[in-house]
Image: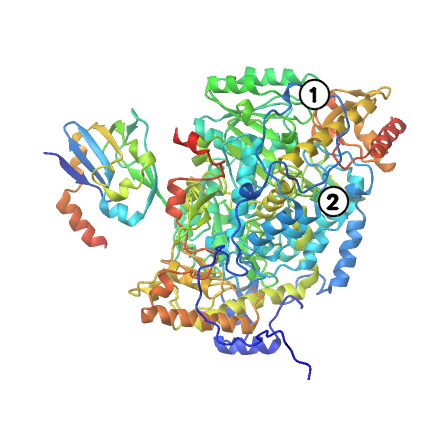
Amino acid sequence: MRYLPLTANDRTDMLAAIGVKNIDELFANVPKSKLMRGLPDLPLTKGEIEVERNMGAMAAKNRPASAGPFFVGAGAYKHHVPASVDHLIQRSEFLTSYTPYQPEIAQGTLQYLFEFQTQVALLTGMEVANASMYDGSTAAGEAVLMAHRVTRRKKAVLSGNLHPHYADVIETISRMASDTVVRLDANPVAATADLKAVAAQIDAETSCVVIQTPDVFGNLHDLTALALACEKAGALLIAVVTEVVSLGAVTSPGAMGADIVVAEGQSIGVGLNFGGPYVGLFAAKQKYVRQMPGRLCGETVDAEGKRGFVLTLSTREQHIRRDKATSNICTNSGLMCLAFTIHMTLLGEKGLRQLAAINHANACDLADRLGAVKRVEVLNASFFNEFTIRVPGDSAKIIEKMARKGVLGGVPASRLLPKNKAVKDLILVANTEVNTDDDRAAFVAALEASI
Amino acid sequence: MAMNTQGRPTSAGEASTKSHKTFTGNYGLQIEEPLSFEIGRPETTGVDLPAPKKMTSRLGKLARAGEIGIPGLSEPETMRHFVRLSQKNYGIDTGLFSLGSCTMKHNPRLNEKMARLPGFGDVHPMQPQSTVQGALELIDTLAHYLKELTGMKAVAMSPKAGAHGELCGMMAIKAALEAKGEGHRRTVLVPDSAHGTNPATAALIGFEVKAVPAQADGTVHVADVKALLGPDVAAIMLTNPNTCGIFEKQIVEIAKAIHAAGAYFYCDGANYNAIVGKARPGDLGVDAMHINLHKTFSTPHGGGGPGSGPVVLSERLAAFVPYPFVHVGNGFELVENEGRKTKAEKPFGRLTAFHGQMGMYVRALAYMLSHGADGMKQASEDAVLNANYIRAGLKDLMSLPFGDQPCMHEALFDDAWLKDTGVTTLDFAKAMIDEGYHPMTMYFPLVVHGAMLIEPTESESKASLDLFIATLRDLARAAKRGEVERFRGAPYHAPRRRLDETRAARNPVLRWTKPQPLAEAAE
Amino acid sequence: MATTRYTKDHEYVRVEGDVAVVGITDYAQQALGDVVFVELPSIGKDVAKGKGAAVVESVKAASDVYAPVSGKVVEVNADLEGAPGTVNEDSSGKGWFFKMKLANPKDLDDLMDEAAYKAYLATIS
């Protein structure tokens, strides 16, 4: 077997050196009746050729995003990732290293984490950021738990236009931890009404408000007033961003007064991967840093006075605080952070702003084209690169019809909100820099032919 | 004759062997690299993008004003920046990575190639299901492998890492208890030797943690468990093989006692790699166990993630798998919500957006297909053989906390043998760096003083192990001879000397900030 | 003259009039290593004897500091926030944690005096 260097002779010699007759003597603690005699009922060793054939066949049954017009978003976005990103993250020294517990031989990882934390803080408009969470949704769950620790209250208010998966994640952990969640109804049409409904729920028990911008329907929100309302009530404002490229074009949540910002970082550097691995961004005000979950990388010096980096403030974490830790998180999204950091470094402010501008302009173009289609209505007053349309009929069926015509036209809102009858005719449509005029024309044609 | 008139010397000659300080601070291939923020420029970008179409903005009043402050680098500068950073890192491909409990085995590159097939890497989680049948088939195939290997009934695929898997398993236990009207059970038994994630996970969802002692042989005895069982106990969280590298020999009796008391058995599967193809957790009485695909099934650790932590579940917990999960019928269906589930299924909720770590599933399955049933069993045996070979090669010089007994995939030493040498476990570890090795896990498990936990994995050849053993023997003798300087100052030959962690923690600097111009700074 | 009493968990309490000054002993600061952070109780908080009242952190450990006696916190050592190393440099002086008003002066009777504490240290080291 190509991954196993020991030869049969080696094994014999080594057993003798250890002083046992056979390998099963080393498994002596396993109860005899429980030690497997034969092999598991699975196929035997395969060479590379066979594995590639086998897995290639499975892969071929899927329709890749790049295979044709593609407008699917709702929390994960098809963006172009520069070739150098994927090359660099496959460097052995990055790919096959561990969490940087030995900082003297992990400065590469530590330095990019420090750069990542700085980039995330700047993008979100916050003072500090951690070294990543699993993804945006779990980051949102952790943010709510953190708000409970900071405020010593136990009630979270979730905006109705928060991504339903994010709301589900928060609800699940909250129910298990016996905390209270108030989850409002989605409001795809009157986006500002959602903000008002959220503000109306804030009371003396409220630990935090969770609100997303752009929201799941694509609407942009000015959070300034809500931040003030939270502050007045002693609650924290948690802002969620599921499309991080938007921060190249719109005001950061930090600038609007958010206390904690969580985001899905997949759009920068990370591919679609059918939902994971992604990278959760987590940023907060400096005063809350000791309640933050996850790893933090900090600057220091070595014995010769040279600048270096280490994991720090570790007493918050599970390996030290155990049952009193701020979170149970251990492994996070190291390599995805690296992809994010490299792509962000390539973009720089100039590239990010331009990327965001292209996304927005392309979406505006598509919205205008769709606005001209009979019986189709664009619902958003404002948006970044994703908006919601109303179509005549069952949106899920229309999306399936469009798919058969080669166009992946977006996400039917009913897939995310199956119980909400009011969204049955809505489609979330995303448009990024990868879509061309031809793609948009194909979208319109496929939609017209499917309604 | 044709004379060579270049005068170029070709022997080492009388070159000095002494080192000197360089002008740049670089030393050959070891090049100092500033932060991207210190070398980047706001007007620079390493991507060429077309000009955006001229459209009326729909950003309303929320268009970003002012600068963000992230400088850019051109592509060649970016390559150099990150390649130089990579050269300050130690990886599995560099050398033997003895970090116990972390299973730093070889990461096959076929896995990487498969994960990058557009049909896996470039599909969106919210595409119509009709367009991702192969992706769902892959998830279902991996689930089948995991269930077959562990002898368990069901598997929750979505957890994003080991600790997330623990959370999933403990939530399933809580849901099962509540379904039986036994939500009052709030105590979870956890040995002191457990990973910190165990008590942290239990506490996160409102359980109270009670410690179970281990006996002098390093294992938990059923009598100690029985003494703690009662109507308030919800579960035990036991790592097997345990964090001391020993298989819990009374595990079957412990499982029986736990079940008889109406509680559940959560097994931390971080060390499952020792027994794949040798013993099935389902046969041992385990109710829930997470599997770190990034340990046992070779997906790369990537400097701290991404991981993936599917949780296998016994018959007693199988109904509680969280959303989403796959139904197989006429094709594959991803069940994402209530409307599509069967009556028997009682999902406790959702752990993450979308469907989990697909990229890691592909890699893990590529590894499993490559190894096959025979290769996976051989890998477990080799991992155990390698660890015992190291234990046997060092036991006369270094001390074993639980006596001379076989270990599983990792060998645990304590620091009793360093007493009065003036060398600590930390010093010893740092001296290993100078010798070109990644140190073992140290000071864990907490139950052993000055613990040194060595896990070579099956990826090491005999020659590699022999050199490792010889190196550690040399270091051990040096420590005993009193060559303290070799240890206390170590590492001498790494990209950095020892770092001041006290300073980092006392005055946390967690991000780069623009240096203030002198005039302002003086204010 | 101030009386100082000690707990088995290495806290000290120095009674000055009706106020008790609480900190950790020199032995404790040495065992902890470099102190990097101290989490202090809020002023006005009632703390119960033997219950966690503060947390002291080194780089690799976080330890609860238990109230040696019951009472109300009247003052905390805010200087420790910027200079936690003071606990290492002067644990019995400038490195104090908080001051409290004793609820029950008899609580002191259960604690060790200096000689007893020294004898106790000799038994554990």
Number of numbered labels in the structure image: 2
> Which residue is labeled 2 in the image?
B122
> Which residue is labeled 1 in the image?
A382
> In the rendering, at what x and y percent does residue B67 appear?
58, 29
Assess whether mark 1 and mark 2 are in contact (beta carbons under 8 angstroms). Answer: no
Chain assignment, label 2: B
Amino acid under disc 2? Asp
Q: Image point 70% across, 51% down: which residue? A: B115
Amino acid under disc 1? Ser
Q: Where B190 falls versus A151 (above or below)?
A: below
> In the rendering, at what x and y percent does residue A356 appear?
69, 31
Q: Quadrant of residue A337?
A: top right
Whether labels 2 and 1 share one chain: no
> In the rendering, at what x and y percent does residue B195 appear?
46, 50
Residue A132 shows in the view: no
| Residue A253 as seen in the image, left or right of residue C67 | right
Q: Where B501 falls versus B397 (above or below)?
A: above
Q: Which mark lies nearer to you, 2 or 1? A: 1
Q: Secondary structure at mark 1?
A: loop
Q: How is the image coloured?
A: rainbow
> In the rendering, at what x and y percent does residue B377 appear?
62, 65
Is B488 or A39 nearer to us in this picture? B488
Chain assignment, label 1: A
Q: Image point 56% across, 36% down: which residue? A: A120
Q: Quadrant of residue A364?
A: top right
Q: Image point 51% across, 69% down: which residue? A: A26
Q: Secondary structure at mark 2?
A: loop
Is A321 or A418 nearer to us in this picture? A321
